[in-house]
Amino acid sequence: MSQSFDAITAQLKRRHRRSANLKRMSMGALILAATFLVVFIGDMLAKGLPAFQQAQIQVEVTYSEQAREIPPAAVGDDVRSLVSRGYLRLIPSRMEDDPDLLGTQRMEWVIADSAVDQYLKGHDSKLSAKQRRIVDRLAEQGRAELRFNTTFFTTGDSRMPEMAGIAAAAMGTVMTLIVTMAVCFPIGVMTAVYLEEFAPDNHLTQIIEININNLAAVPSILFGLLGLAIYINFFGVPRSSPLVGGLTLALMTLPVIIIATRTALRSVPDGIRQAAFGVGCSRWQVVRDHVLPLSLPGILTGSIIGMAQAMGETAPLIIVGMVAFIPDVSASFANAATVMPAQVFTWAGDPSPAFVEKTAGGILVLLAVLITLNATAVLLRKKFERRW
């Protein structure tokens, strides 16, 4: 009897020891994952926050006929190399928009060259010793400083890093997602309603369900190849446009919305359906007036998550050409455009330190939007969730 008791005690001790080891390993994995997340976010913040500041210098700008023909002549020789070429190119158009500027001289804050920007931020720059002395003198006089980079949020892409922004990419992303949701949301919801509420349980519907689940796990680049083959080569949809990008992402997002909608429909108790049938409702009336309204929060949550996933995709959009150089905001769904992930991908390929900042800054903006969308999905689920 004592031997049996001792054996049971030893077995319990081994179980408790294994349980403690498993708990320690789980905590270690959690700490390791949290460490990676903190390091990633910290690195992005360290590299990306400087992108939200841009060096500006105060110089005397002369609006003359000579400046209309030769824009660099609008500023003095000593500071000409310190002023952004992109800003100087805008001087003729500014005089066309405001003829009163012609023949005037003004002290203005202008966007500085990226080398000046890097120097004021304490990074290595290509400024010569003479240029550095000029910048130091301007900084001592309060005429050179770092200011909030509004250009980053109001302009499109540019070959000059100090003039590059995400406005065109952001608008392209919005237009692409509008097309995506306009196509995949109604089709996905109607498909899920049919499969869950109307379709008979036979081999055909089982095959369709298996294929839908498999499509949700297909690599996204394959959807890009499918979009290239069908929409561009067969139907002739304009390449690099939000239309073809949205249609391609709709193919990828459709299985996600179907699965999320079916899960939301299954969460509605059968008692709701039986009660509606009991008062004489048809099957369509049961679905339209009772099941769909009760499952709508879950459907919206799944759709928002699917949209956030589509927003972060790059590979399928690269295949359909949405990595074009887009300096201006697209005015049509059929015009060439780019999206934020593709814009970040383009900047990441430039070795310039200023574009490294732009890349990290674009990632921070993209992360902020994605976190906002996912948080919205969670809040909607918490607010409208019903426990049966």
Image (tube, helix red, strand yellow):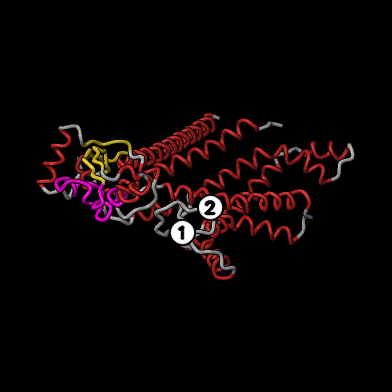
**SS type, badge 2:** helix
Tell me if residue 382 is in the magenta stretch.
no
Q: Position of residue 92 (x, y in %)?
A: 31, 51
Mark 1 closeness class: few <14, some 14–19, many ≥20 residues within 10 Å: many
Report the residue at 71% width, 58% height from top.
206
User: Is the residue 200 above or below the residue 34 in the image?
Assistant: below
- Magenta-colored span: 64-90
Amino acid type indicated by mark 2: Thr
The residue closer to the viewer here, 386 or 47, is 47
The residue closer to the viewer here, 325 or 137, is 137
Q: Name the residue carrying label 1.
A: 322
**SS type, badge 1:** loop
Location of the N terminus by quadrant is top right
Question: Can you see residue 39?
Answer: no
Identify the mark at residue 176; answer none if there is no mark: 2
Q: How many marks?
A: 2
* Distance between the alpha carbons at the discs numbered 2 and 1: 10 Å
Question: Can you see residue 334?
Answer: yes
Question: Of the residues under marks 2 and 1, which one precedes in the sequence?
Answer: 2
Amino acid type indicated by mark 1: Met
Report the residue at 23% width, 46% height from top.
83
Q: Is residue 197 left or right of residue 133?
A: right
Instruction: Quadrant for residue 290, please give it.
Output: top right
The residue closer to the viewer here, 328 or 290, is 328
Q: Position of residue 313 (x, y in %)?
A: 48, 53
